[in-house]
Image: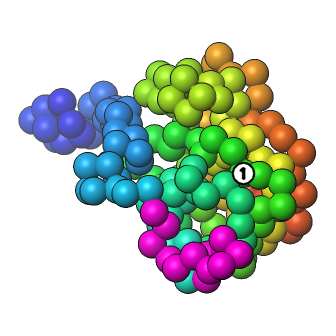
Amino acid sequence: PIDGEDGDDNDETDPPVVESPITESWADYVNSEGYDGVISGALGNDNSLSDGIDGPKDLLALNSKPSGTYKLNQDIDLSGKIWSPVGSFNSGATLDGQGYSIKGLTINSTITGPNSNGWGEHVGLFAVCNGTVQNLYFKGVNITHPSAVYGGALCGTGNPTIIDCGIKGGQIA
């Protein structure tokens, strides 16, 4: 029973409420909303995103645009759904968080599966990152991937240039 529902008016003896695990992925969600693989901002001639990244759909679209210059326009909340890492962020690409945060990044191998992005042993926002990431912060990271060989909030592997980035709260196991 949920706290207070067993009729005894003694909430201290009630069993704790256990929340159900997250089961929906961001990729499944945006696909159900008509995701077309296109970043919502306008791409310039140099493959840069002039209007910036505004949400999960834009982050997922980096799968189809792993090179270019991108910026976050606001904090992005990924809470409530499983993140499937963007496959690769190429050398020469830049992601400028502009001081904004990505909140609630959750990766769970039992949901995304080891081959969901072709980089099963590498987990993070990006499976592989060789670009530049700057001024980006993560809050409340929760990565559970027992079969992963490489993992982190930003990327599973690569040789990125990281400038003024950080993590506050969460776990990687």
Q: Residue at x 78, y 71 (%)?
A: 135
When the figure is inspected, residue 115 is found, relative to residue 24, above or below; the finding is above
How many marks do you count on the picture? Answer: 1
**Name of the residue lying farthest toward the left:** 7
Question: Is residue 8 on the magenta stretch?
Answer: no
Secondary structure mostly seen in the magenta stretch: loop
**Splitting the image into 4 quarters, where does residue 59 fall?**
bottom right
Characterize the local packing of mark 1: few (<14), some (14-19) or many (20 or more) Cα atoms within 10 angstroms.
Answer: many
Q: Which residue is mark 1?
A: 89
**Secondary structure under the numbered disc 1 in the rendered image:** strand
Image location of residue 160, percent across then percent down: 86, 51
Is residue 144 visible to us here? no
Q: What segment carries the magenta color?
A: 38-50
Residue 44 lies within the magenta run:
yes
Extreme-front residue of the structure: 45
Residue at 63% across, 67% down: 101
Q: Position of residue 78 (x, y in %)?
A: 48, 55
How did the renderer colour the structure?
Answer: rainbow
Q: What is the three-letter code of the residue carrying label 1?
A: Phe
What percent of the width, then of the height, locates residue 50?
Answer: 61, 83
Image coords of residue 134 (percent x, y): 81, 68
Q: Quadrant of residue 142?
A: top right
Quadrant where the image shows the C terminus: top right
Q: Is residue 130 left or right of residue 97?
A: right
* Residue visible at 49% across and 23% down in the picture: 113
Q: Quadrant of the N terminus?
A: top left
Q: Is residue 18 above or below residue 55?
A: above
Q: Is 50 located above or below residue 163 in the figure?
A: below
Residue at 9% across / 35% down in the picture?
A: 7
The front one of 79 and 157 is 157
